[in-house]
Image: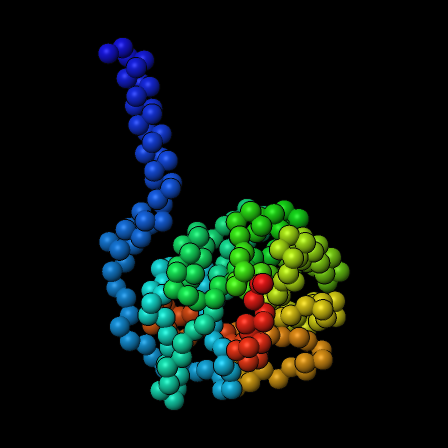
Amino acid sequence: MPRWVKITLWFLLLLAVVIVSYQNKKYFRRAYRYFTYRYYKTSSRPSDFPDGFEVHGIDISHFQDVVQWNKLQAINTQGDTIRFQFVYIKATQGILIEDNMFDENWEEAKDHHIIRGAYHYFLPDRNPQVQAFNFIANVKLKPGDLPPAVDIEEAKGQSKAEIVSALKEFLNQIEGHYKVRPVIYSNINFIEDYLMDDFKDYNFWVSHYELDHLDIDADSLKWIFWQHSNKSDLLGINGNTDVDVFNGTTQQFDSLRIK
């Protein structure tokens, strides 16, 4: 057999391996984690959950690694089981980064009938249009999903005016593409310092911990999600997890979902 034929055949074989590996990367990752991370929780400690909320959720990224979606639950300090109806999943960050667990988490949430939403970690010192393109290129929302969310919690040396301008440009790009108004996530201090005055038409997802209730005037801030802890102990996830509640009834939550 001529040498050039051998080289061509080896090249074609290598190309086929690369294509198959890429198409099945999810399964290769699962196999790798199965053999390297065999320990999973069999119990969880009681965690604090605020009273009076019907809809509970979590938000995750690659930091949580693999999630056992069929076991996802927690126990509150009264001994009651908390089940989670929704999850916000980190999709992208800045202008180039896609969270390396997003595709798997996105698919698994749907397969386990957990209402899903995707969020982008926004950097005010990076081009907002390119950041919007990064998110749009990686996130395909469908009816039943939650509105897209943007996580902004760092000023990155930018002034309030620069932050407001960049964030508005990003939000306009996202809303124009998905035809639904995004949700803004941040901690209460960042909201008060940079966002409170200029985004009154947006729903907020507020991060504020160690409280029994979130005491915010509804006329000054329309908050619909509250991240009330970043260290809850859940079955189904090794390590601590962010947990959230929806500020409303189950019917109101359903009306928020993309039609």
Percent position of residue 32, x then y? 28, 50
Spot occupied by residue 23 in the image (x, y as percentages of width and height): 38, 42
What residue is at 37 percent from the left and 77 percent from the top? 74
Above or below for 176 versus 246: above
Snapshot colouring: rainbow
- Residue furthest top as drawn: 2
Q: Is residue 4 left or right of residue 231?
A: left
User: In the rendered view of the protein, which quadrant contains the C terminus?
Assistant: bottom right
In the rendered image, the vertical position of residue 244 relative to residue 103, given as above or below: below
Seen in the picture, residue 116 relative to 12 is either above or below; the reply is below
Residue nearest the viewer, comparing 140 with 80: 140
Image check: 212 left or right of 80? Answer: right
Q: Is residue 208 visible?
A: no
Identified at 33% across, 67% down, the residue is 70
Count the numbered circles shown: 0
Quadrant where the N terminus is found in the figure: top left
Q: Position of residue 57 (x, y in %)?
A: 47, 72
Q: Is residue 183 visible?
A: yes
Left or right: where does residue 94 sit relative to residue 56? right
Q: Residue at x 31, y 47 (%)?
A: 28
Q: Give the residue drawn at x 54%, y 56%.
A: 141
- Position in image of residue 198 (x %, y %): 74, 67
Instruction: State which quadrant residue 169 falls in.
Output: bottom right
Q: Residue furthest bottom?
A: 78
Rendered position, 164 above or below 139: below
